[in-house]
Each structure stands twice: as C-alpha cells, then as structure tokens.
C-alpha cells in the first residue's frame, strides 16, 4: 500500500510506527514564495495520525513536510522509498534506501547487454514492440466506436512492423517518435472536448492536459522505481534511454509499454467523464498547478488502478497492475540470466 | 578451515538444493524475493512465537542459525511452519549436525518441529548423515558455478514458492 501525503505537516517516527502531524499552512498565492520552516515546526498540528509502517510500500510527498534523520533511518530499515514532488506535481527526487537484493552478477550482465549492440537492440525492440502494440490496442478500442480512427490505427500497425528493420537505437526511437505523433494526433478522436489535435509538450507543459499527462507519467515512473527497488536489477543501466538521462533510467525504459494502457487510459477516463478538467489547474509561472482536491482525486484513481486485477495466463491467477510492473522486471532478469525471450506486457481490448 | 565468502554455504541453501535447484541458483546469484513474500514472513513469526521460553536463536557463524538447542543433551532443534515435512528440512539440519560435529561440538540428534501439524521428525548424526552432507556440499558448489540457472520445471510446490513470479513472469 502506498502512502500519499497531500497535506503539509510533520512526518515523524514514533516508537515503531509513523506519525503524521497535519499542519495547515496559509494558502500559497505564488508558488515561488518559500513557506518559512519555523512556522511548520512550531505550529500545533490540526490532526495527528499514526500510520502502520508494516503495510506501507512507498511514501509520496506532495506538499511541504518536515522530516528528520530518525525518520529516514527508520524508513531505510523498513525498506520504504520516499518520492518527493514539487509544487507543479513534478517529481523532484526519490530517497531510496540501501538495496534489498544485491546481485553483482546481474549488474554485470546488464552492463554487458548494453555494450553488446545486438543484445541491446533485442531488448529495445522488445520494449518498443510491446509499446506500439499497446498504443495500437488503445486506438483500436476507440476505433470500434469511431471509424475515422481506423486509418491511423493501421498506420500505427504498419510502422510497428518496421521495428525489426532498424539497425540502431536511434532508428528505433525514430519509429517510436513517428508512432507517438500519430497517436497523440488521434486523441481528438475520443477526447470529446478537443477542438484541435493534441500536441505533447513538457518542460514546461503548455496546457492543463499536458500537465496531467506529465503528472500521471511521473506516478507510473515512481511506481516502477519502487518495483525495481524490490528486485536485484540496477536501475541506473538502461537500454532504450541513455543511461545518463536519469538516476533510474531503467525505470524510464520499463514504463514505455505501460504508458498507453495505464497512464493514458486513466487520463482519458478522468477527462471524458469531466472528473478532471481545465478548471482544476491554475497557471503558475512554470507550468500548471493542480488544486488539492483534484490531486487527491487523481491519486485515489491511480492507487485504485494499481490495485485493480487482471487474469494472467502464465501464472493462472489474477494479478494486480502493480504486480504486472514487477513481473516485467522479472522478465528482463530472466532474459539477462538465461536468454529467455523478453516479451514485456501486452494488453488486448 | 579458511572460507572465502563464496565458499560458505548456508543451511538454507542446502535446504533449497533438495527443494529446487533453480531456486538455489537464483538465491546464490542475489535474486531473493523471499523478503517480500507473505509465507516467509509468517514462517519467521511462528519461529518467534512457539518456543519463546527457551534460549533463542544460536547463530552458527555465516552458515546459518539454529532455532534453539540443548547442548547438554546433545540435541538441536528447528521449527518449520509447513503443513508437511519439507524435502529440504532433513538435509538442512543434517548440515548443521555436520558443521557442529566437525568443529568439535558433540551433537547426536536434530529434532525438526512442525507446530502446525504437531509432529516432530528426528535426524540422527551418523556416517550416513555425514556422507549425505558432503555430497550435498559438492553438488551445491558445482551447481552455483553454472553460467545459467537450471531450466524451468513447473512443480506442485511452485504455487507456494516465493520465486513463482520470478520463474514464470
């Protein structure tokens, strides 16, 4: 179970569990103002909640929360990562305790797989194959109701088939880029309110919908960081994305197949049911800021999605979406250890 | 005897040898999903609750931990959560008997307690036991040296194993 802290306050270790003291701060009118930490530490809490630490998998912090070393050492003992988000809902960093499972052998194999272009291409192709397949499935789902989408659906499929001809990662990324442009362009086919084609922008996002996409993508990314942490894979060695791009670049790789079927579909549902809309975002100097109630709504939906289950034939039982992320990590491990075919998760609708 | 880190084989690993060779290989190579697994956490809890009166766990260097022991009587004890005697249990306690006796600690017998089914299994220290253990040690060494893990075979026990997801992802 994830813990999402959407209020400001103080998080402390108390005996063998966690204590969150909620402190209501004056409303921020301008995101660039720093709230004085004195206020946060001295003001009496509005509410104090004890939280059972054994059931917590990861902690997400969205507002100003004071922490101390006693707490962080305790969280490290309990193997609980902490993900920090800034005012704009942008993931600014993660505190990851010491590894649970150390496998020097696996890390060496990851590095060897990166250095050997043929192996690296195999992994990248598998990832993108699954990603494009999932994009195709999503478009297909909406094409059933909107025949105008059939053409772009076919185009996506055709481009997907050219993956096997690419000879280096740049060519692969080129194909992926083309497919993504087609995909984003098709969004107006089912996102009712759109008057023009969707343009994906980030750093900073130029529309509230873009801000929502960035936010939900970072929830998916941090979910993968948490799952990678529970495996022996080293998150710094990635194949598709350059290993220098981020500290957990392997998480960036592994999220690709899940973006269309988890992140995007949830966004479409929220947007089409008017659960979340332009009205929930405030324009700040560096992007859009979600209102607190809408942030909580999105987090509740996301958490419910992580716990939602589907039947998996290979295990002959139901698994949650969160377990699907972990299983994809294991698939990569099996590929690296014994050359087993690597097939990241594919969804059919 | 001087042991390098790689040379040390724990009681748990000897047990894995008899349960599943693939599990042993993965464990030795740092893939250890046990920490997340509900059944394993319950097992640790049962160990804590059942024999709390006696002297608690006795670590055996890097090789493992005895649940509890009665050295005056020459008996060591092990508690297991399972409903049926596991394949690896006898081998594991046999290993502990070997370790103790070859290091000059006289122990004649090992008792494996299954509190859930209220039964106890007894392993005697004798030449046959010693032979089996020495054989096991050699098998473990050879197995973990392999480049790739032993191939995947689905067995009935896979359903209850912490490595099920790793193997069948």
Image (spheres, coloured by chain):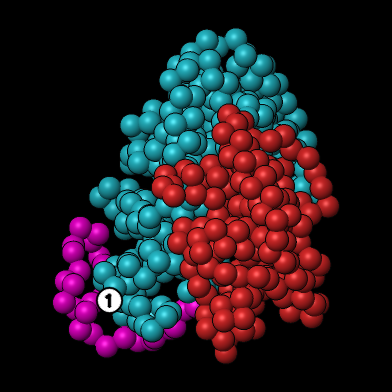
Chain colours: A cyan, B red
Q: In this view, does B166 lie to the left or right of A27?
A: right
Q: In which quarter of the image is residue A123?
A: top right
Viewer-proximal residue among A183 and A243: A243
Residue range highlighted in magenta: A25-52
Q: Which residue is drawn at 55% across and 58% down?
A: B102
Residue B149 visible (yes or no): yes
Magenta stretch: residue A36 in it?
Answer: yes
Q: Report crowding for label 1: few under 14, some 14 to 19, many 20 or more residues within 10 A (C-alpha).
A: some
Magenta stretch: residue B61 in it?
Answer: no
Horizontal and vertical percent for residue A332? 58, 35
Viewer-proximal residue among A138 and B110: B110
Q: Which residue is drawn at 73% across and 54% down?
A: B128
Q: Residue at x 60, y 31 (%)?
A: B146
Horizontal and vertical percent for residue A233? 49, 41
Which residue bears the numbered disc 1?
A25
Q: Identify the image quadrant of the C terminus of chain B.
A: top right
Residue A274 visible (yes or no): no
């Amino acid at each position: 179970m994830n813990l999402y802290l959407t209020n400001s306050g103080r998080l402390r270790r108390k005996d063998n569990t966690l204590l969150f003291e909620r402190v209501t701060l004056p409303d921020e009118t301008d995101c660039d103002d720093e709230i004085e930490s004195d206020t946060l530490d001295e003001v009496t809490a509005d509410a104090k909640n004890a939280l059972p630490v054994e059931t917590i998998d990861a902690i997400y912090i969205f507002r100003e929360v004071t922490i101390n070393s006693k707490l962080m050492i305790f969280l490290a003992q309990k193997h609980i990562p902490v993900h920090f988000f800034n005012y704009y809902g942008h993931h600014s960093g993660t505190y990851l305790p010491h590894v649970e499972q150390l496998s020097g052998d696996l890390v060496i194999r990851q590095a060897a797989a990166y250095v050997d272009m043929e192996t690296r291409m195999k992994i990248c192709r598998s990832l993108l194959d699954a990603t494009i397949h999932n994009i195709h499935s999503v478009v297909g789902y909406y094409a059933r109701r909107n025949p105008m989408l059939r053409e772009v659906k076919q185009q996506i499929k055709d481009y997907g088939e050219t993956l096997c001809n690419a000879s280096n990662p740049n060519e692969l990324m080129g194909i992926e880029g083309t497919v993504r442009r087609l995909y984003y362009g098709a969004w107006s086919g089912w996102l009712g309110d759109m008057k023009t084609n969707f343009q994906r922008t980030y750093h900073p996002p130029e529309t509230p919908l873009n801000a929502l996409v960035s936010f939900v993508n970072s929830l998916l990314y941090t979910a993968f960081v948490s799952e990678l942490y529970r495996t022996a894979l080293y998150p710094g060695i990635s194949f598709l994305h350059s290993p220098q791009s981020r500290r957990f670049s392997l998480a960036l790789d592994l999220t690709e197949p899940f973006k269309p079927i988890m992140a995007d579909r949830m966004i479409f549902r929220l947007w089409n049911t008017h659960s979340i809309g332009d009205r929930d975002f405030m324009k700040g100097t560096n992007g859009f800021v979600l209102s607190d109630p809408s942030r909580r709504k999105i987090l509740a939906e996301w958490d419910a999605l992580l716990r939602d289950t589907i039947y998996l034939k290979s295990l002959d039982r139901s698994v949650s979406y969160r377990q699907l992320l972990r299983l994809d990590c294991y698939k990569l491990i099996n590929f690296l250890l014994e050359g087993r075919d690597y097939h990241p998760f594919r969804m059919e609708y | 005897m001087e042991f390098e880190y790689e040379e040390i084989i724990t009681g748990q690993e000897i047990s894995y040898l008899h349960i599943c060779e693939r599990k042993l290989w993965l464990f030795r190579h740092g893939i250890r999903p046990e920490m997340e697994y509900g059944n394993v956490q319950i097992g640790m809890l049962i160990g804590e609750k059942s024999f709390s009166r006696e002297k608690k766990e006795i670590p055996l260097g890097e090789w493992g931990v005895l649940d509890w022991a009665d050295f005056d009587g020459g008996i060591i004890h092990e508690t297991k959560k399972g409903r049926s005697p596991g394949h690896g249990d006898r081998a594991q306690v046999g290993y502990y008997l070997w370790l103790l006796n070859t290091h000059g600690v006289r122990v004649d017998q090992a008792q494996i307690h299954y509190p859930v089914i209220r039964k106890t299994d007894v392993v005697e220290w004798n030449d046959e036991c010693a032979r089996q253990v020495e054989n096991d040690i050699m098998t473990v060494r050879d197995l973990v040296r392999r480049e790739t893990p032993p191939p995947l075979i689905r067995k009935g026990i896979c359903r209850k194993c912490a490595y099920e997801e790793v193997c069948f992802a």
